[in-house]
Image (spheres, helix red, strand yellow):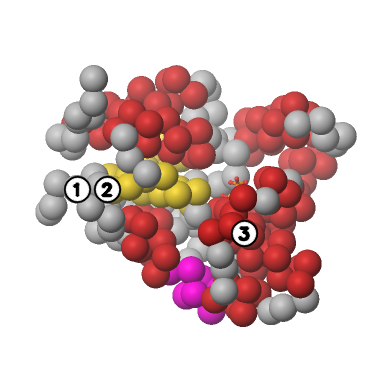
Amino acid sequence: MSNRLIIAIDGPSASGKGTLARRLAAHFGLPHLDTGLLYRAVGLKSHQTGRTPIETAANLQTSDLANPELRTDSAGQQASKVAAIPEVRDKLLNLQRKFAHQPSGAVLDGRDIGTVICPDAPVKLFVTASPEARAERRYRELRERGGNTIKPRVLAEMAERDRRDSERAAAPLVAAPDAFLLDTSDMDADAAFAAALAFIERKGFRSSGP
Ligand code: CDP
């Protein structure tokens, strides 16, 4: 196995994988790709332009990832619909593999990083939390951004997206057999980071920074 550090992080919505990915990337000085943004951008752009999701995925530009609208819950729902199309996933595969295999190493988070994009990653984390804990976090996040929503609706939409992501035939959300399972239901971001870091250090990887 090479000692290049590729950290593959998968898990459902609001499990804490994005925060964990950002913190690990900063700690190890690695570039980070939030792969959910790719599917969000395909969903939103194909909806806005009327082009097919496959065509949109084939012509996706880096500038498409900068749109603040991508963070909304409706963009998340659109994303999980286009993400079920195998040809859309195929079009986004090379870009993700190339990012993962750059010489510096990398951190990627998504739904199929440890299973499809980087089955060879030396570090795989599968981050989960109870549906209630995840809905509570998403609700607070939406409120902080000034959104007007109610908790039962957040829980219902999350359940719908979980179902679509786990039951689809193309790259469903599952933990890789060699992934470290991290249940963050009763953990804050610091505790999740400490647990993930301990696992990575046990594998022999250390930050070369100060
Ligand atoms: O931030 P959150 O976890 O809510 O969503 P996201 O990571 O931005 O992903 C949005 C949607 O894109 C997910 O519900 C998945 O359907 C899809 N996705 C995927 O299929 N594969 C990935 N590697 C990343 C996201």
Whether the residue carrying mark 3 lies under 8 Å from ligand 1 is answered with no
The image shows residue 100 at horizontal and vertical percentages of 33, 55
Identify residue type, mark 1.
Arg
Instruction: Give the class, few, some or many, for how many residues have Cα within 10 Å of label 2's Cα (few <14, many ≥20).
Output: many
* CB-based contact (under 8 Å), mark 3 and mark 1: no
Left or right position of 106 against 112: left
SS label for mark 3? helix
Left or right position of 116 against 80: left
Q: Which of the 4 image quarters holds residue 160? A: bottom right
Identify residue type, mark 2.
Gly
102 above or below 195? below
Residue denoted by label 2: 105
Whether the residue carrying mark 1 lies under 8 Å from ligand 1 is answered with no
Real-space CA distance between mark 3 and mark 2, rounded to the nearest whole angstrom: 24 Å
Residue denoted by label 1: 4
| Magenta span | 85-93
Quadrant in which ligand 1 is drawn = bottom right
Instruction: Give the class, few, some or many, for how many residues have Cα within 10 Å of label 1's Cα (few <14, many ≥20).
Output: some
Residue denoted by label 3: 64
186 above or below 164? above
Q: Earlier in the sequence, mark 2 or mark 1?
A: 1
The secondary structure that dominates the magenta segment is: helix
Name the one closer to the observer, 205 or 58: 58
